[in-house]
Amino acid sequence: MLVGMQTDEFITLTAPTGGTPGHHMSPGDELRALFEAQQLVRDLSTRVAAHTSSPVHAVLFAHLVEDTHRTAAHGQLLAARTAQRTLAHELPQRTFTSVRQIHDDPTDYLAGTTSLPDDPRTVPTGRLVFKDTTSLLAGILHINFFAARDRVQATERFLPGTDLAGNPTPPKFPRLAQDLAEGNADPGALKAGAKKLEDLTPHINTTDDPTGLAQELEAQVAESVVHEDSRTTNKLLTGIKNALTDGKHHLPPEILRTKLGLHHRGCIDGLEEFLLRVLPADAEPLLALCASIDNARTKAGDRSALAAQATATNPTGTASEEFVASGTSCPQENTTEPGASEVSISFPDFLVDPATGKPLTDPHRIQELTLNPVTPSNGFIAPEHEPNSGTNSAANDGSLESSTLDDDGLTVPQRHLQGLLNLIRAARKSTGSTKITGLPAPKLFVVVTLAELEARASTHGITGHGKHLTAGELRHALCTSGAIPITLNGESHVLDLGREQRFFPDYLREAILALYGGCIYPGCTVPPEHCEIDHLQDWALGGSTRLEDGGPMCRGHHLDRHDGLITVERAADGLFSVRLPKYLDPAQKLRRNNFWRNWAQNPYQPPDNRPTPRTEPPPDTPPLF
């Protein structure tokens, strides 16, 4: 009760009325008090750190600051739940701007001369600024989307709420929620423990008394988080998981499906790591693929061809001796030499002849640039001779995980990987126009300079997803992988100016994506395959379908631009940048997306003789871009 009295007194003292008799505390007064309290904490932390020379005082200082951190972590969840409960993401853009201005300069607000904007009196119409609470927190707080999502999800685990009927519901983990509210343990450890317990819920539900077991396990985890170190807690959680799954060979489908998927683990020790989990029934095609690859008597299992494919480039970036000596050649989709009319379809027409500046149509010249002689139609590197009974006649009978090198220099897993990569590459070489649902035909795009393409540079190309290639890997990708080069000349000019038409053709879309990498909105991580190319100078206002007039945007940010929520402008270097709303960027600077490209090095400079638009916007409509 004493703490409550002190809090009320502090709120009264910080209110603009200064404790005037008859004044009733309001939520606005409490927000002003929180402003003042935060400033006090910042000032006191700086003062104590500067004036403390006693180790005893330093220990107490560390305790107090940790308490503040734990209180703030609980406050983050309270703020997320409050934003979710009040539907704050439905506010109009001008409200976010006004609130941001008050937050950045609260002097007038604390003095009572400025008030917060009024709540909307009507249901919002049109496109919302933020689609949900997660995007709201990520946008206004400038935090990672996944961090914002974790906060929203954590509110269900640690805070009470209401169900669809409006009835109050307790937190999912009440014991851990109490420890978080009281600051008894590190917030990160509590959140991690709750997340792992939630992942074990399907296993717990298969027991005879799931409710009692869940409470018992939560108490054990809470006790460990509060009194033990993180390694002990992780060991406890691992033991719980093993105990729940021990001896269960037939887990329920709902548990199995939570583990399915192809997971990209990132680049680890220079290798891109993927983790693949499939159902037993779905494993059969993969096992059949491996068995086919293991059979050296078949064309799919040809040892010399697989070795040539797997070792086409070595870590130094030069063609391996085995690849050269094998007599293999680079793949081509057609067994016969393509005519000039076929080149425009099968090869990017923005590769131009440096001498004439016109798109290349001579098939012999194209083959010289791609280092690509004619080969069989299967799209794979063909061996010089078919395997016979005297060469690699015995099928490999080792395990799928064998790390023993065979005569061809490959382990069994390496051979299986090469077969899977060949299968993926074959999907890019479709013989017809019909596409199959669920069977993607991925394209490999490589951004290169003309010097790199002609093998006159020791630098590397960059794939569409930002992966760097050595000079040897670049040449091999152009030769064997069906890669589509997006070519730039020595001054970083894309060698194509496009053709005027309403929609951006595929080759121009690919060139624009090569410039920007992905969506131009700062921080957007939507893959380039999902981006749309927008006329950043509207077609109706004189925009044209040219390289310098197009910009990639994901669907959400594309709609935001047309709804006036964001502004796109051409910067001094000719590339498009984004000016964010004031509530996101009070400085109102032009921003770029650094996720896909390092803009310290501009990959493109537009031509100086850019034609003027055909029409001008109406005088009463101020241009946005």
Image (spheres, rainbow, N blue to C red):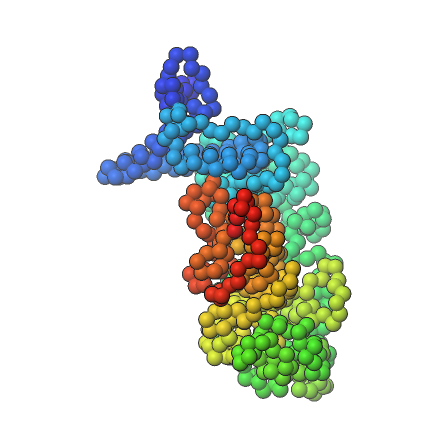
Q: Nearer the viewer, residue 578 or 177?
A: 578
Q: Is residue 484 visible?
A: yes
Residue 15 spot, x, y in % from top left: 39, 22
User: For the point 41% across and 20% down, which residue is it?
Assistant: 8
Quadrant assignment, res 263: bottom right
Q: In this rendering, would 278 be left or right of 574?
A: right
Residue 75 spot, x, y in % from top left: 47, 33
User: For the point 57% across and 85% down, which residue is it?
Assistant: 324
Quadrant assignment, res 294: bottom right
User: For the point 24% across and 37% down, which residue is it?
Assistant: 51
97 up-or-down from 420: above or below: above
Quadrant assignment, res 100: top left
Q: Nearer the viewer, residue 269 or 312?
A: 312
User: For the point 71% across and 56% down, which residue is it?
Assistant: 279
Could you tell me which quadrant the N terminus lies in? Answer: top left
295 up-or-down from 15: above or below: below
Residue 113 spot, x, y in % from top left: 39, 25
Q: Is residue 248 visible?
A: no
